Image: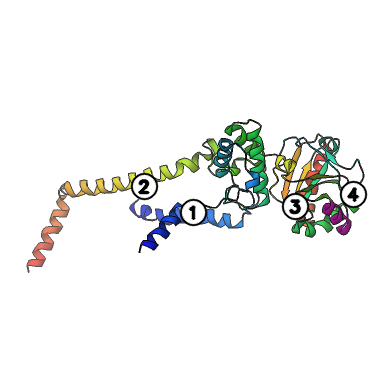
């Protein structure tokens, strides 16, 4: 039992394996940390659903190297991101930016949720008022039909 | 009205299904290039060994006439498939083809052209980390760019060029640009 707990603890503390090679890393740990944070959000154009930090593809490696070059040259995080987006478009960002063309993407789910909520609330409210309100009085003709039916059933 | 409302989930499903159906026919590798209508990136690439001192590729080489810029590498498998057709284009003289030997050992790049034929006027070597290729927004090889007389990128094709694509899409674009 103790061994199992230990194994689980070790598993949960192990860091995910990154594709970043030691020879790519920047000497300054603060700069390397920035490169890692940036790399996490940049899409590998070859594997498409991995970040450049996770991917072993050559192009991902190239982009990691180029990102580090820009950082070493003194670019800010935004400048580095702009450099890559200028060449590969917003597609390269794993988290799409919030702008006019992505409005539906960001607000769609919220709108759908609010819409569904409105339908549900409307449904229950209508049902409750229907239960609470007494049925409208019968018209003269309806009353006549009802009387007739009742008389027939009595027989 | 009530009855129509019960059909709403079916309608939503139908719309989603249409989107997904469309998605099945799209190629996820076809990423719209942001470089269309932008000038060719600044570059001055070294020539391949054995192709002559002045046969490298620079930005100025892509000005003055319409050209096709082909990204290849001796490691690139699809390039082998594409190459015979590039040779045909060269033979017909449809358009001048320039090349970037991407992420390659120049010696291997040159040997590959010796073996498969050399349809290129100029070849520039872009060694790792492929700065020029990244400036072009290259995502893989082969990739081809149509560059107009002013040195502006007008079209990008991802993957091998084949006869049908050439006749129906690329050549008409080139002819149109040549008129301007």
Residue under numbered circle 3: B142
Q: Badge 4 sits on which subunit?
A: B
The numbered mark, 1 or 3, whose residue comes first in the sequence reads 1
Check the picture and name the quadrant holding the C terminus of chain B. top right
Residue under numbered circle 4: B93
- What residue appears at the point 53 percent right and 55 percent down from the top-left corner? B20
Residue B109 included in the magenta stretch of the image: yes
Percent x, y of residue B120: 87, 48
The numbered mark, 3 or 4, whose residue comes first in the sequence reads 4
Percent x, y of residue B13: 45, 56
Spatial CA span between label 1 and label 2: 17 Å
- What kind of element bears circle 4? loop
Spatial CA span between label 3 and label 2: 47 Å
Q: Badge 1 sits on which subunit?
A: B
Q: Nearer the viewer, residue B21 or B79?
A: B79
Q: Are marks 4 and 1 on the same chain?
A: yes
Q: Nearer the viewer, residue B79 or B10?
A: B79
Spatial CA span between label 3 and label 4: 20 Å
Residue under numbered circle 1: B16
Instruction: Select label 2 or label 4 by which is in front.
Output: 4
Write the start and end of the magenta stretch as one range.
Answer: B107-121
From the image, give the main secondary structure of the stretch colored magenta: helix
Left or right for A42, reference A110: right
Rendered position, B27 above or below A101:
below
């Amino acid at each position: 039992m103790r061994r199992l707990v230990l194994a689980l603890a070790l598993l949960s503390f192990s860091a995910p394996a990154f594709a970043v090679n030691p020879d790519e890393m920047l000497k300054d740990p603060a700069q390397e940390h920035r490169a890692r944070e940036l790399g996490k959000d940049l899409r590998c154009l070859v594997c498409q659903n991995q970040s450049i930090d996770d991917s072993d593809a050559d192009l991902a490696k190239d982009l990691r190297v180029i990102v580090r070059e820009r950082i070493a040259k003194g670019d800010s995080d935004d400048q580095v991101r702009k450099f890559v987006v200028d060449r590969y478009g917003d597609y390269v960002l794993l988290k799409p930016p919030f702008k006019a063309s992505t409005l539906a993407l960001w607000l769609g789910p919220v709108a759908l949720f609010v819409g569904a909520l409105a339908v549900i609330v409307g449904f229950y409210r209508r049902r409750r008022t229907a239960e609470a309100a007494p049925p409208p009085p019968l018209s003269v003709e309806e009353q006549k039909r009802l009387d007739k039916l009742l008389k027939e059933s009595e027989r | 009205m009530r009855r129509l409302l019960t059909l709403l989930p079916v309608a939503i499903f139908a719309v989603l299904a249409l989107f997904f159906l469309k998605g099945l026919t799209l190629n996820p590798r076809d990423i719209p290039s942001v470089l269309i209508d932008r000038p060719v990136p600044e570059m001055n690439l070294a020539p391949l060994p054995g192709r002559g001192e002045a046969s490298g590729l620079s930005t100025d080489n892509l000005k003055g006439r319409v050209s096709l810029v082909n990204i290849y590498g001796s490691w690139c498998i699809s390039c082998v498939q594409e190459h015979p057709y590039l040779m045909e284009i060269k033979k017909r003289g449809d358009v001048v083809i320039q090349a970037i030997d991407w992420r390659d050992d120049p010696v291997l790049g040159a040997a590959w052209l010796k073996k498969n034929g050399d349809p290129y006027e100029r070849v520039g070597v872009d060694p790792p980390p492929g700065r020029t290729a990244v400036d072009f927004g290259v995502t893989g090889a082969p990739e081809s760019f149509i560059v107009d007389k002013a040195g502006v990128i007008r079209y990008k094709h991802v993957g091998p060029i084949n006869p049908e694509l050439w006749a129906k899409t690329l050549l008409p674009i080139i002819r149109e640009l040549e008129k301007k």
